[in-house]
Image: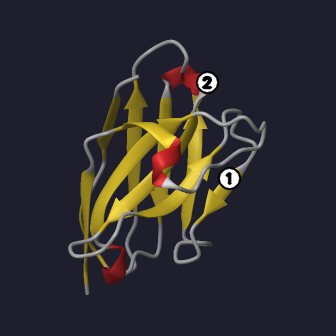
């Protein structure tokens, strides 16, 4: 599967963005999907994940209550709504696709994902 992330940009603190990740292929609904981010000098961290059906989600502690992950199987797209953005949210955001043996699985480790998009830059100014 190929992933194409978009929607990043420059926004002021407190603002919002919506990231999109379009997936190619006919088996999108069988993948778990995740969003990760990496800031300069820091390790890649999980932001959010969603299981294959969309019924189970996971959020990193730093984004709980502010970000929302969703997926639209008809459009082969996963979204990440970013609200109440903070300067510390500044990073390159990556979407990823993988598999889970659990119906409700939402993998939170990068090496559990087999496919990665190219990343989209989010910059939050103070």
Q: Quadrant of the N terminus?
A: top left
For label 2, the crowd category at 10 Å Cα-Cα, with few meaning under 14, some 14 to 19 and many 20 or more, is: some
Number of other residues with Cα within 10 Å of mark 1, as a class: few under 14, some 14 to 19, many 20 or more:
many
Q: Which residue is mark 1?
A: 57
Residue 105, compared with residue 72, is above or below; it is below
Q: Does residue 118 appear to the left or right of 68 in the view shown? A: left
Q: Position of residue 6 (x, y in %)?
A: 29, 43
The outermost residue toward the bottom is 126
**Residue at screen point 75% across, 42% down:** 55
> Which residue is at the far top?
26
Q: Secondary structure at mark 1?
A: strand
Q: Secondary structure at mark 2?
A: helix
85 or 27: which is nearer to us? 27
User: Which residue: 55% across, 71% down?
Assistant: 66
Query: Which residue is rendered at x = 34% and y = 81% of the image?
Result: 88
> Vertically, is 7 above or below 77?
below
Return the residue at label 2: 29
Write down the quadrant of residue 90 in the picture: bottom left
């Amino acid at each position: 599967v190929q992933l194409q992330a978009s929607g990043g940009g420059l926004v002021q603190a407190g603002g919002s963005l919506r990231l999109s990740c379009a997936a190619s292929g006919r088996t999108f609904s069988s993948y778990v999907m995740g969003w990760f981010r990496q800031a300069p000098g820091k390790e890649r961290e999980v932001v959010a994940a969603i299981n294959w059906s969309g019924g189970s989600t996971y959020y990193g502690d730093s984004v709980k209550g502010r970000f929302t992950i969703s997926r639209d199987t008809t459009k082969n797209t996963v979204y990440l709504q970013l609200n109440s953005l903070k300067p510390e949210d500044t990073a390159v955001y990556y979407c990823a696709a993988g598999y889970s043996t659990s119906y409700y699985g939402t993998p939170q480790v990068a090496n559990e994902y087999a496919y990665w998009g190219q990343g989209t830059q989010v910059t939050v100014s103070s």
